[in-house]
Image (spheres, grey):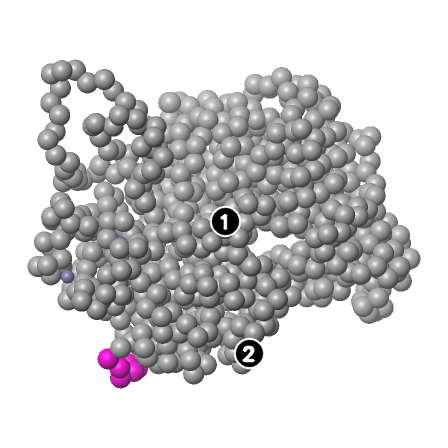
Amino acid sequence: MVTMTGWSDLSEKSKHPPPLAEIVTLSSVQLQASTRIPSEFTIETSQEGAAAHVTVPRDTTFCETCLTELLDENNRRFAHPFINCTQCGPRYSIIKKLPYDRQHTTMASFDMCETCKKEYSEPTSRRFHAQPTCCHDCGPVLSFVDNENKPIETHDCISATAKALYENTIVAIKGVGGFHLACRADADGVVERLRQRKRRPHKPLALMVKSLEEAKRFAHISKAEERLLQSPERPIVLLRKNDQWENHLCPGVTFMIDTVGVMLPSSPLHYLLLEKTSDFPLVMTSGNPSGDVLCCENDDALSKLNSIADYFLLHNRPIHMRIDDSVIRIIDDTPVMVRHARGYVPRSLPAPISLDGLVALGGIQKSSIALGRNKTAYVSQYLGSAEHMATIAHADGAMAHLEELLGITPKAMAHDSHPNNPLLHVKRPQGLPLIPIQHHHAHAAACLGENSHPGPAICVVFDGTGWGEDGTIWGGEFLIADYSHVYRAAHLKDVPMPGGDAAVRYPGRMAFSILYQRLGDQAKDLIAWMDDSEKNTLAAMLDANLNCPKTTSMGRLFDSAAALLDLCRERTYEGQPAMELEALADPFEKGVYDYDCDWTGPAFLIDGASILIKMVQDIADGVEPPMIAARFHNTIAALAADIVGRLAEQTQINTAALSGGCFANRFLFKETKKRINALDIQLLHHHHLPPGDECVSYGQLLIAAETLKGSQNEQPDWFKGLRRPFRGTRSPRSQGQAFKIRTNGFHYASGHGVLYPTEPVCQTFQKAYPA
Ligand SMILES: [Zn+2]
Ligand SMILES: [Zn+2]
């Protein structure tokens, strides 16, 4: 907290805080004549254990003044790769505990030289209390080694790295929150070698360029994108490629995707390197082996990346908290977070009630954790997919780190209600109460929470996979929800996934399954590129209901549409078929397909097959694929708006919310927003967290807090008004598993369609942890 005097107009001043300052609250107090006013501004010595009410600073790139010094041959920090000041530099990634003092950072082991010490203690200096401050004499140093850790003879590691990159080798570079793998982006051979070695055949690779001008050579950049690229957070921004891109990038950087992820130098080290390599953009992809987390220490990187990188540019400033680059795209002038990480975390978000002591484990596929303190939720960085053991260990570390920084002792833990949730392997105190939360309800709550909306709202949650209460995989959902109650009002009709995960990997299987369910053997004539033998095998599996879990996923419907257009026979990264379909879609095509929906049941059932059949007809009629792809997107947006409109009319609820990974799709988000806005319905969407699973931990915290308050037992009027029974039944197997494995002695009831603790449990909790 900063106390200022002499501000005549607080609200005017608050519009221009210092670059890294965030004004959380602003209040003015009338002082008594006798009040002693301090004569000067001072920073007092921190008290141990005073961490509880300070915020955690985030990592930022170099400021303009540091850049000037970096380039000034007469400055004592000329070309110093670790230059920083009070306005800039690493923070979250190097802080071990709060208060934020040098001895609590990974800079503690570097003793300041006399000159640095003087600057640090001089109130008029730019580096007064700049905790990571250092210089050539006292700061971290670089080293350049080959992949057997043999030092390469050089007096200038950055020039040696630039030379190695110029010569088409792959270099692992230690940055702010972890390692990158770098190579030239204009040279086919080395990009292909990187893809082979990293076992990443198709997923787009991010680029780093020195300046906006460099990026403009191959991408369209709007004013909003320019601001974002140059912001102190330095995220990767997804930009549309222009028609000159092939002169600057090799096709293997992004393949069929029409956007490219670009960032400007995120640290002085990267700036110095890019100064020397500005003839060509650099691929700068995360430095991790396939299925593992980002490497952040030198030894770790040398042992895990030595079969990928030819050389390593290392430094000896330890990274305490590993953190990836953030990824953002601008859709319709709205920033949509795609990966929430460096520069933005830990993120603090509001809550309508106290979240004190609650922690949440988040979603399984794109994990993040969240912790509650008072009425604020703190959301971690993107942690990876919890299907990998390394991610669980990373979640453990991130949880312990945030507990330490925020002074939080967990009282209860919220988690995704999936019966085999791997995240429950995180370290936790014995007997810590567990609260399972339905995946899409958490999405809905996160979107309401970000907008400080009390609910209820008609929440459209479109994503790939989330455990549903009836034992099927949900993902094409219309939920009417607030933080305590949820009603599944409409969804895609469930369809079998032949082979389970194999149907996700091979999108043609989903397309066939959906068509076969509706058309029977006639479906065998429809997907021209698929072998007859494969179709016969799939038909036999579907007939026998052999390993065919059911799903209502919107992600799988997108996969199927992509498969009908033969875009992606094998998916090698999450979202690939949908991203290729989005890239193909003609933005000027306005056509919409009719779709069937069963409006009679307790929940409206949308028939995905009816849409695919229209696509098949268009394909047979020779309609151009970009038009077909656009019509598919338009149809999904139109059905979202139709159903929101009907539900709004029925329930008199005039707020809608959009969440789920599908809404990172530029075409779908824009079109759905436009159509719902035309209905005169208030539309909420995410502003800070990604619409994908990284928002789930925040939603879990909000629901868990209401759960522990016992809010499920008091039905709000809007919920009573629905008066329709929950559709679908939970299979005894899933019920048994959920009870035995997940609940740690908890009792659960599923009266409202979602598993939540019963009244006695809430009372026990309230006794143990009185408010
Ligand atoms: Zn600075
Ligand atoms: Zn120094």
What SS does tag 2 mark?
helix
Query: What is the number of the mark on residue 188?
Result: 2
One can see residue 657 in this view: yes
Name the quadrant containing residue 479: top right
Spatial CA distance of label 2 from label 1 is: 31 Å
The answer to whether residue 575 is left or right of residue 194 is right
Name the quadrant containing residue 732: top right
Disc 2 crowd, CA 10 A, few/some/many (<14, 14-19, 20+): some
Pointer 2 with pointer 1, Cβ within 8 A: no
Query: What is the number of the mark on residue 224?
Result: 1
What SS does tag 1 mark?
helix
Q: Quadrant of ligand 2?
A: bottom left
Provide residue 628's location: percent of width, then percent of height: 78, 55
* Residue sitting at x 49%, y 43%: 689
Q: Amino acid at mark 1?
A: Ala
For the record, the magenta segment spans 150-155
Q: Nearer the viewer, residue 271 or 712?
A: 271
